[in-house]
Image: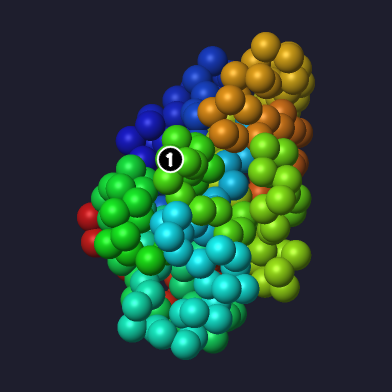
Amino acid sequence: MVGARAVARAPADGYTILLGVSGLVLQPLLVKSTTVDPFKELAPITLIARLPLMLVVPRSGPTSFDDFIRQAKENPSRFSIGNYGVGTPSHLLSIMLNQQAGLDLPLIPFQGSAPLATNLIGEQVAAGFLDSVTARQFSEKLRFLAVTGTQRVARLPELPTFRELGFRSFEQDGWLGLLAPAGTPQPIVAKLSKQLARIVAMPEVSAKIENMGIAPVGSTPEELLTVMRNDSDVYGKVIRSASIHIIP
């Protein structure tokens, strides 16, 4: 949160902006001593891109989401769900899956996406939630079962969304967004938003973003604020219900 704190305290003149991610919203929910309130101290500019999260298993694992749920209920001792860190979307989605699917699988934290992917490939963990960038890097060695978000991934049109499978509140994606210090004049925010959205929409730029495994957006400030509020609402309920706290 060092960068967020620096931007929040910078002059509100449009010359200092922050590249933020979903952790910007999660941090205040997890760490009581967090020094930046993103809703009070930062001003959304634009949502650059969305990063879907995917439930993945080793290549030798279940062949479909329904197969995964069935096997996990029949042989729970053989299954666990890995995540890339306590309090991350990967961890919170794992809790939600357990709750909504009627499972009680162990949740195994790793220190990042790459270690989680490595342990999935090595079959040390039975399933896990990976971000689309990491999942793309290891796609030949993993099997994808479902994806977050409101629509299917263009590069994996056969992969169902959790919404299609009947699961609630899995519309949350990871995201990349730009924010300015609170108090930045609205005309400046509007101009930045318009110009940055235009850049994201350029074919050469959007192609590079898509090649990384993420979906380019380029939104209004209001749309980014809506995404942030939804994350806070959905994940906040999970954090409170599971009594998750991180001591820095």
Q: How many labels does the image show?
A: 1
Say which quarter of the image contains residue 124. bottom left
In which quadrant of the rendered image does the C terminus lie? bottom left
- Compared to 244, does 14 lie above or below? above
Res. 90 image quadrant: bottom left
Measured along the vertical axis of the image, is residue 198 above or below residue 141?
above
Instruction: Please tell me which residue is depicted at 29% across the width and 54% down the height of the picture.
Output: 122
Whether residue 244 appears in this view of the structure is no
Front residue of 166 and 42? 166
Identify which residue is drawn at 75% across, 50% down.
151
Q: In the image, is residue 146 above or below residue 6?
A: below
Left or right of 50? Residue 26 is: left
| Residue occupying the far front of the picture | 60
Quadrant into which the N terminus falls: top left
Q: What residue type is labelled 1?
A: Phe
Q: What residue would you read off at disc 1? A: 138
- Judging depth in this view, the residue of 8 and 63 nearest the camera is 63
Q: Where is residue 78 in the image (x, y as percent from the top left)?
A: 34, 78
Q: In which quarter of the image is residue 79?
A: bottom left
Asked which secondary structure carries label 1, the reply is loop
Give the x, y percent position of residue 45.
Answer: 65, 31
79 horizontally vs 48: left or right: left
At x 34%, y 51%, the residue is 121
**Would residue 221 appear left or right of 29 to someone viewing this image?**
right
10 Å crowding of disc 1: few (<14), some (14-19), many (20+): some
State the scheme by which the image is colored: rainbow
**Measured from the top left, where is residue 101 in percent x and y?**
57, 80
User: Could you say where residue 31 lies in the image, as x and y percent from the top left?
Assistant: 34, 59
* In-image side of 234 versus 62 (left or right): right
